[in-house]
Amino acid sequence: MSAPCPDASGGASPAPSAALAAHAQLDTRVAAGVAKCLSDYFAARRAAARGNDACFTEEIVEHLERFTLGGGKRMRPRFAWWGWRAAGGPESGKQATAALRAVSALELIQACALIQDDVMDGSTMRRGHPAMHVAFAGTHRVNGWAGDPERYGASVAVLAGDLALAWADDMLDEAVEDPGARSRVREPWRAMRTEMIAGQFLDIRAQARSDESEATALRVNRLKTAAYSVERPLHFGVALAGADGDLVRALRGYGSDVGTAFQLRDDLLDIYGDPSRTGKPVGDDLREGKRTLLLAIGLRRAREREDRGAARALRAAVGDSGLTEDDVRAIGALLDELGARAAVEERLHGLLERGLRHIAEAPIGGTARDALRALAHKATSRVH
């Protein structure tokens, strides 16, 4: 077992009138607590891994550690933590420390998903640095090793993702010692992993089939992002605390809507974002051939206007690996002119409002409700 993590709360509950104002500071402490749990876990596993092979430790374990600890918003553990708190889980003490360790394991699932998603999409940047498969390919190339650097990079990155997935399970099992709690959290844990993989498969399949339907784009968003990023982490936290019934339904409804809105914001940032803020170039979704809801609506609007030129320009951009930033901005302007951007913004805000209604009357303490409201707004209005 790794060294104890700090309590997530850092102190007593704020008064109800001050809860919303205190949320940002409290949520920062939660994120810092998650980072500490992960750092402690990696320190223990790194020491154990040295018994296997020094190269394995230096090239995979330490790279995975830097990747996991070096970026990210800790969004999934934060939602899971507030699910725990919404269900009456304590904010401090032994139980809270164990819960914080448990929710921190979600970051290893996220590391696996990002690493392997970058391999499948051929993305070159992640969090402002070369994607892991690109970095490993670079090591191969610099050292003049035999074989194809790109294949080596992809292979080692897949192994790093597999290791993250395996260690996520280990971290969860070590954190949740109570057999009843372990049994309860396994339902959302299993569902989350399966839904994440199903969403990724549907995303790849939609690209291969050039599927332009809005229904498919929303289905991918629901499984690949909404369920995995918000809904199931909340379900995980609630299950860990031992609640069920109406509270689970309310938080899952909130999570599905807010998670889908989160992905729609991500789709908009891919076209209209600032690379210095997002850590990746604009237009990656276009270059990779993804049919986002933004693009699907743009194509529908072009058809409705019988604007063949606009439809032709949009289809030509999808999957074009040579798109420049200026090209992407031009596509963005076209989607703006077609009204697609405004339509996505409208849907996004509608989902946010519906999500917040799910928790408005749910049996949730004021601090947790305020935290969930603030997280919903932050997730759907972010600029990176």
Image: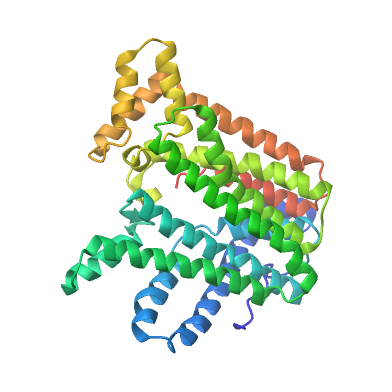
Relative height, residue 15 to residue 6 (above, below): above
Q: Position of residue 115 (x, y in %)?
A: 41, 59
Residue at 69% in and 58% down: 236
Relative height, residue 333 to residue 284 (above, below): above
Q: Position of residue 212 (x, y in %)?
A: 44, 28
* Count of numbered circles in the view: 0
**In-image side of 178 versus 215 (left or right):** right
Q: In what quadrant of the picture does the N terminus appear?
A: bottom right
| Residue 181, quarter of picture | bottom right
Residue at 42% in and 29% down: 295
Residue at 81% in and 60% down: 88
**In-image side of 181 versus 305 (left or right):** right
Q: Position of residue 119 (x, y in %)?
A: 36, 55
Relative height, residue 178 to residue 67 (above, below): below
Q: Does residue 295 show up?
A: yes
Relative height, residue 148 to residue 355 (above, below): below
Q: Position of residue 167 (x, y in %)?
A: 54, 72
Q: Does residue 12 show up?
A: no
Residue at 46% in and 44% down: 383
In this rendered view, identify the residue nearer to me: 199 or 279.
199
In this rendered view, identify the residue nearer to me: 368 or 161.
161
> Residue placed farthest to the left in the image?
144
**In-image side of 258 versus 14 (left or right):** left
